[in-house]
Image (spheres, rainbow, N blue to C red):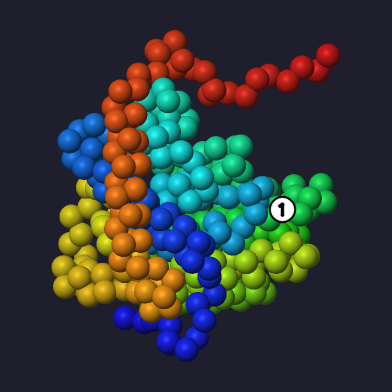
Amino acid sequence: MQTAPRDAQLPVTREQGLEFLRQMLLIRRFEERAEQAYTEGKIGGFLHLYIGEEAIAVGAMAGLNADDDVVTHYRDHGYALARGIDPKNAMAELYGKATGICKGKGGSMHFADPKKHFWGGYAIVGGHIPLAVGLAFAAQYQNQPRVAVAIFGDGATNIGMFHESLNMAKVWNVPMIILVENNQYGMGTAVHRASAVPDMVTKALGYNIPAAQVDGNDVLAMRDAMMVAALKARRGEGPQFIEAKTYRFRGHSMGDPQRYRTKEEVEKMKARDPIVRFELQLVEHELATQDDFAFLRNDVDRVASEAVEFAETSPFPDPSELYSDVFAPEASNG
């Protein structure tokens, strides 16, 4: 397990550090409660948990401005919470309730909130990458200082839309950040069985896009990598690429029997738990104590419980709303 040297200063204040830790704890507790509700039959459809990867979402969102555009894959709960979406509305969305952030019509894979420039949550693997190119092009065309971030897993780097998007992003030199979460498996297929190269950063080089590989279980490393990438993209240096190396502690989805990896492998990787590592760093640098951690854990337990209660007591959407918000209003030519 890695910790910073005792004589090195941790690049974070006590307040920032505790906030990053609170967000990671909240994501984990939120997902544990969602996992429980799913097994009780209260949540339908698919549920892809983010447990073990919390440092990427928290660090990445901390490195962006509030009006930067974010488009992500279907393992999106962590990003939504790190972006500031209310856990009550997020949990209600999982329950399919009218108080959900998408009025209960999107579910787990389609979290979105335009007010926060959080455009989803896409179920089609890699299908959202061209959308991020378009958002980045719009910011460039309108001379706005925004960047657009496309987030997806290592498996999506093997499909056509990934390559077409990187090519156009570089041709147009748009302010885009490509963030790849390399959690070692595309569904149940190990990276080495599906990708010609083990490191995703290699694929960015084919399009002459600057690329960095980051320890995705280090929240501060993630924040710093995103800040650097956003700065370069914002000042006209074109698309930037980040590969975050990580590991998911749960299966691909709730129905995954995980026959493609051993329990020993999973337990071994839990030694790099991003939450435990960051707590050790905060203690090592005398920025927090065990009492602080206990307070935060109690607080996120309360928030998650309130989110579950809110979801369970909220109404389902009225059937008359079935076709509302499906299509954009027809534009008038008059």
Q: Residue at x 49, y 66 (%)?
A: 14
In the rendered image, the vertical position of residue 40 relative to residue 327, given as above or below:
below
Q: Quadrant of residue 212?
A: bottom right
Of 262 and 89, which appears nearest the observer?
89
Place of residue 145 in the rendered image (x, y in percent of width and height, measured from the top left): 76, 54
Q: Is residue 278 visible?
A: no
Q: Is residue 279 visible?
A: yes
Q: Residue at x 61, y 43 (%)?
A: 117
Of 54 and 298, which appears nearest the observer?
298
Place of residue 25 in the rendered image (x, y in percent of width and height, measured from the top left): 35, 55
Of 86 and 262, which appears nearest the observer?
86
Which quarter shows the C terminus?
top right
Which quarter shows the N terminus?
bottom left
Q: On the picture, is 259 further left or further right than 312?
A: left
Q: Residue at x 37, y 51 (%)?
A: 27
Q: Which residue is mark 1?
A: 146
Q: Residue at x 52, y 48 (%)?
A: 83
In the rendered image, the vertical position of residue 74 relative to residue 20, given as above or below:
above
Q: Quadrant of residue 163?
A: bottom right
